[in-house]
Image (cartoon, helix red, strand yellow):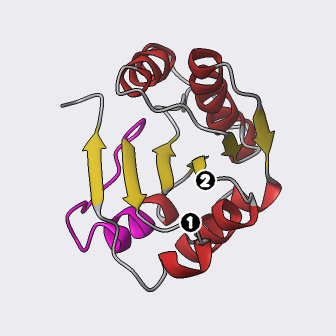
Amino acid sequence: MIRLVLVRHAKSDWGDPALPDHDRPLNDRGLRDAPRMARALAETGFRPEVILSSTALRARTTAEAFGAESDVAVSLEPDLYGAPARTLLAAAAASGAMKVMVVAHDPGMTDLAEQLSGGGIAHMPTCAVATFTWDEDDWQVVNAVDPVDWTFDSPSR
């Protein structure tokens, strides 16, 4: 069984316009939402084998909150910064794990969540969590088969 969890990074701070996009930290709301959403996911019983994260500070910090909650190390993946949906899914598949979390950015996160949910998820707001489950054990099948189940949660829900 393959389980994929997509997490869009938590709300970032735009207070310093001179700061490069890659280096923007989380704002107060983001720092509050990331651990809260991590706890909510942990309460479902899901524990990833692998957490893949964009190298951007806001994504790393979000991923670290999820990693701390599940006691899983975060693997930083430069290709996930600003990645399109196909790159996000390919990174998950390349991990070889059956329970994978990917923490990255829009528009790629929303595009992938929308694709995998058959249009059921139209937008991934900051710190949203979408889970997808397949009865398959082969990542090659994921592109050809709809998930048997998916869920969506966000801090605003």
**Side (left or right) of 116 relative to 53:** left
* Residue found at x 71% / y 34%: 57
* Residue found at x 74% / y 36%: 23
Name the spot of residue 142 as percent of width and height, x first: 49, 75
Q: Is disc 1 surrounded by few (<14), some (14 to 19) or many (20+) residues within 10 Å?
A: few
* Residue found at x 41% / y 63%: 134
123 inside magenta stretch: yes
Q: Which mark is residue 137?
A: 1
| Viewer can see residue 20 | no
Which of the two residues, 68 or 134, is positioned nearer the viewer here?
134
**Mark 2, secondary structure of its residue:** loop
Segment colored magenta: 110-128
* Residue found at x 36% / y 74%: 115
Residue under label 2: 98
Q: Main secondary structure of the magenta part?
A: loop
In the image, is residue 155 above or below residue 9?
A: above
Query: Which quadrant does the C terminus fall into?
Result: top left
> Which amino acid, mark 2?
Met
**Mark 1, secondary structure of its residue:** loop
Q: Residue furthest bottom?
A: 144
> Which amino acid, mark 1?
Asp
Which of the two residues, 17 or 76, is positioned nearer the viewer here?
76
In the image, is residue 59 above or below residue 120?
A: above
